Every structure is written in structure tokens, then in C-alpha cells.
Amino acid sequence: MKDDCIFCKIANHVIESDYVYEDDLVAAFRDMSPAAPTHVLVVPKEHYAHMADNVPGETIAAMAHAVDEIAKAEGIQESGFRVVANSGPDAGQVVHHLHWHVLGGKRLVDDFA
Ligand code: DGP
């Protein structure tokens, strides 16, 4: 855990949040500035800065499993959803702890992200 990282703190319950899914490797909680009716962030409990930070396959698999569980629980599995991983400055990454945005519950085709 990185001491100055907000998502490390949330994923490891140092700071509590609005959790929707959790297992040994990942936590998922609602984005504080939702861009869609469902806007959940899936984050690993270990600290990785972004998608190009040698993230273990086991962690990626756990994140993908979390997306599946969240889509079912949120009722967006059939209607559709988007998964976004902003990585680095050109993507506008603000929080430098790997996270996947899971967005759904409205038409997203005209939204850029
Ligand atoms: P980005 O790094 O640009 O992929 O987006 C970071 C997202 O994280 C942004 O949508 C707002 C959200 N966020 C930032 N800080 C917190 C926080 O402390 N709690 C929650 N729930 N969301 C946060």
C-alpha cells in the first residue's frame, strides 16, 4: 500500500467508500462524480500506477471478474456498459492508482468517455 494514495486507502478500508463489490484482490466502489447512472471504479488492493505498470494477470482477471459481477448486480449486463482505463497524461488520468471505470445505465454511444 502506498501511504499517500487515496485509492490504496479506499481499497484497503483505511477510508470507507460506497462499495459494490470486493474480493481478496480488488475492491469496487461508486465514483464520487458519476458520469452515468452506474459509475463504479474497480481497483486492485495492491498499488499499480496504471495499465502499463506490470500488473499481474491474476489481478487483471480479478478485475474482469469484478466487472462481470458488477454488471449483473447493477442490471446492466444486457443493456450494455463501458469499461474505461485512463492511463497517463494524454488520457487525463487524475488518480494514479490503476482503476477501471464501469459506466452504464444510459446510452453512451455519443459520449467520449
Ligand atoms: P481518472 O483518474 O481520470 O480515470 O478518474 C478518477 C475518478 O476517480 C474520477 O471520476 C473521480 C473519482 N474519484 C477521485 N477521488 C475519489 C474518491 O476519493 N472517492 C471516490 N468514490 N471517487 C473518487
Image (spheres, helix red, strand yellow):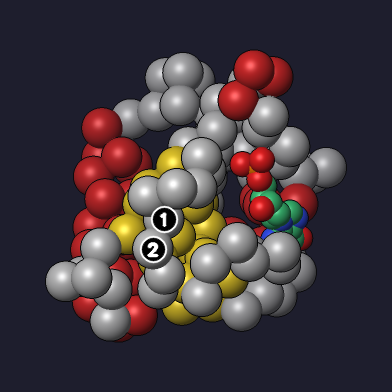
39 with respect to 89 (left or right): left
| Residue at figure coordinates x 31%, y 40% from the top left | 60
Q: Is residue 90 visible?
A: yes
Which residue in the protein does label 2 denote?
107
List x then y, in percent, for residue 17.
Answer: 67, 75
User: 68 and 38: which one is in front?
Assistant: 38
Determine whether label 1 and label 2 are within 8 Å by CB. Answer: yes
Image quadrant assignment for residue 94: top right
Image quadrant assignment for residue 5: top right
User: 47 and 81: which one is in front?
Assistant: 81
List x then y, in percent, for residue 31.
Answer: 63, 64
List x then y, in percent, for residue 63.
Answer: 33, 50
Whether the residue under disc 2 has CB within 8 Å of ligand 1: no
Whether the residue under disc 1 has CB within 8 Å of ligand 1: no
The kind of secondary structure element at disc 2 is loop
| Residue at figure coordinates x 58%, y 70% from the top left | 30
Mark 1 is surrounded, within 10 Å at the Cα level, by few (under 14), some (14 to 19) or many (20 or more) other residues, namely: some
Report the residue that reaches farthest toward the right.
4
